Every structure is written in structure tokens, then in C-alpha cells.
Amino acid sequence: MATIKIKVSDRIVEKVLWLLSQFNPNELEIIESDLGFEENKAYLQGQLDRLNAEGSKKYTLEEAEEKLERIIKKHEG
């Protein structure tokens, strides 16, 4: 079975999905339907912008682990 990826306009996506659903499931399977791609993309871009903003604090993995350990020890009692 071959796998293809298509990009569909928001205006016709429901019609395309309906058309594809008319085929026998043994002949065609919708693997992924990413109807929220643009929303996810915008959200992730916002998060990246926030991380890259001037004044944001960045830690190495080791620094983050040390900080987390200190916080855990502080709250363990």
C-alpha cells in the first residue's frame, strides 16, 4: 500500500475527508488528519518567540536538574 500526503484548503477539507471515507477501509486508510495544523503552528511559534525573547532565562540540562533537585529537597521536609 502506498502512502501519500496532501495539503488541502480549509474550505474543502471536510468534503475531501468525506470523499475518502467512501472507500473501503481495506483499500484506503486515513492515517493522520491534522485539521488543527495552523493553530498548532501559531501556538508553537508563540512559545518559541517567548523562549527567544530578551530577558528570558535559559538553563543547560545540568543546571535545570540541579535546580529541580534543590526544589525537591526544599519541599521534602
Image (spheres, rainbow, N blue to C red):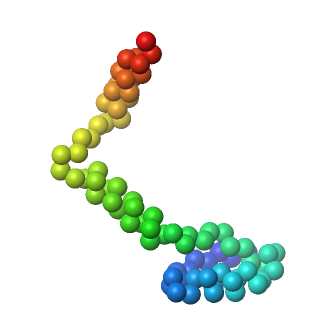
How far across and down, in percent of the image, does residue 45 sit?
35, 62
How far across and down, in percent of the image, does residue 6 sit?
56, 80
Q: Residue at x 58, y 82 (%)?
A: 13
Q: Residue at x 42, y 66 (%)?
A: 41
Viewer can see residue 62: no
Q: Residue at x 39, y 61 (%)?
A: 43
Task: Residue 72: name its quadrant.
Answer: top left
Judged from this view, the residue extending furthest toward the left is 54
Is residue 57 positioned above or below 62 on the image? below
Say which quadrant the N terminus sits in: bottom right
Q: Could you say which is closer to the camera, residue 3 or residue 75?
A: 75
Say which quadrant the C terminus sits in: top left
Q: Residue at x 60, y 71 (%)?
A: 33
**Left or right: 48 in relation to 53:** right
How far across and down, in percent of the image, does residue 5 sit?
58, 77
How far across and down, in percent of the image, does residue 60 sit?
31, 36
Is residue 33 positioned above or below 21 on the image? above
Task: Residue 48: name its quadrant.
Answer: bottom left
**Left or right: 26 in relation to 72:** right
Is residue 53 positioned above or below 42 on the image? above
